[in-house]
């Protein structure tokens, strides 16, 4: 699964509006934001970069005024992390990823399960973007660009789902990338604090996973933050498969 997830990461970055490939790396950029979470690179499976390759990659980020940053499955390219660390890259995080298949899927069947919907209007996409911004504690701000990215995901072969709040607006939701390499990445599962504990994350995760399986994907994978969210995903049928490594070059070493 490690090679498959890393191959997906490469294919997914190649969908970005701006793509640069150099020295066994693929870098994907979104010109409408300088967020490091939306502008980063990943290695090709099995890449063995030289010091010159890493220097060239750093230059791709420097010329755009962006933080040199990578996300990847280290086991799929064992030579990459040592090469990056030798050039000053530090570990941001190591995240375990979980995988769900049609055989492991266990969708919630409770009569009280939240009703999951597909956003349609600009207002619904904006409400979901705002809900996710609140759910993640301001890591990113809601914006027209964020809502537009969600719409493009839905219209471009991926899936976006949300649950309405009783008082109006959006209580929570998530999105899933278009499939590639027979898998898809489910990301950004978020619920507004006032609406947590009501099964929204599980319902949205199940709905998105089912949508990808209906499109023919053999699996869906995701990363989790905290044991509470892990238990939610495991109840839906997600199981541990491997880890993903996040590395970046600290500002003081970027010249």
Image (cartoon, grey):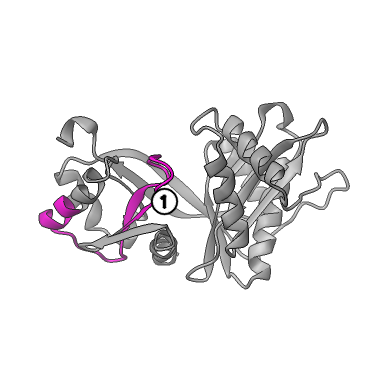
Q: Is residue 8 above or below residue 35?
A: below
Quadrant (top left, top right, bottom left, bottom right) of the N terminus? bottom left
Against 224, is 180 above or below?
below
Quadrant of res 66 = top left
Question: Horizontal and vertical percent for residue 13?
Answer: 40, 59
Q: Give residue 208's position: percent from left, percent from top.
A: 66, 56
Relative to 25, is 204 above or below?
A: above
| Left or right, 34 with reference to 88 | right
**Along the horizontal axis of the image, is 175 left or right of 163?**
left
Residue drawn at x 20%, y 48% as measured from the top left: 58
Q: Which residues are magenta?
A: 27-56
Spot the residue most to the bottom.
Answer: 216
Q: Can residue 102 be seen in this snapshot?
A: no
Furthest residue in direction right, as rendered: 111
Other-residue count near label 1 (Cα within 10 Å), few / some / many at <14 / 14–19 / ≥20: some
Considering the numbered disc 1 on the image, is that residue within a helix, a strand or a loop?
Answer: strand
Q: What x and y, as percent, mark residue 158?
A: 59, 61
Q: Position of residue 162 (x, y in %)?
A: 71, 46
Figure quadrant of residue 78 = bottom left
The residue wearing badge 1 is 243
Q: Residue at x 16, y 34 (%)?
A: 253
Residue at figure coordinates x 16%, y 57% from the top left: 53
Q: Quadrant of residue 189?
A: top right
Asked if 37 appears above or below 218 in the picture, the reply is above
Q: Is residue 38 magenta?
A: yes
Q: Is residue 108 visible?
A: yes
For this view, does 123 lie left or right of residue 141? Answer: right
Of residue 121 and residue 133, the one placed in the foreground of this image is 121
Pick the front one: 105 or 12: 12
> Can residue 58 be found in the magenta stretch?
no
């Amino acid at each position: 699964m490690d090679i498959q997830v890393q191959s997906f990461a490469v294919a997914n970055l190649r969908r970005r509006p701006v793509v640069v490939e150099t020295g066994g790396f693929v870098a994907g950029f979104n010109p409408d934001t300088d967020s490091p979470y939306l502008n980063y690179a990943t290695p090709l499976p099995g890449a063995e970069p030289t010091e010159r390759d890493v220097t060239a990659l750093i230059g791709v980020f420097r010329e755009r005024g962006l933080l040199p940053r990578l996300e990847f499955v280290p086991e799929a390219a064992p030579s990459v992390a040592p090469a990056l660390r030798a050039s000053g890259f530090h570990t941001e995080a190591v995240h375990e990823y979980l995988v769900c298949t049609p055989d492991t899927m266990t969708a919630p069947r409770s009569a009280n399960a939240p009703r999951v919907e597909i956003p349609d209007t600009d207002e619904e996409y904006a409400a979901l973007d705002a809900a996710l911004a609140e759910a993640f504690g301001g890591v990113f701000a809601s914006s027209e660009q964020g809502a537009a990215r969600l719409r493009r995901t839905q219209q471009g072969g991926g899936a976006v789902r949300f649950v309405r709040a009783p008082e109006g607006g959006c209580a929570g939701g998530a999105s899933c990338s278009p499939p590639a390499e027979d898998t898809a990445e489910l990301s950004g599962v978020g619920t507004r604090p006032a609406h947590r504990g009501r099964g929204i994350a599980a319902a949205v995760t199940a709905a998105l996973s089912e949508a990808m399986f209906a499109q023919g994907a053999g699996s869906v994978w995701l990363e989790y933050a905290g044991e509470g969210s892990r238990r939610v995903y495991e109840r839906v049928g997600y199981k541990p498969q491997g880890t993903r490594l996040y590395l970046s070059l600290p500002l003081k070493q970027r010249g």
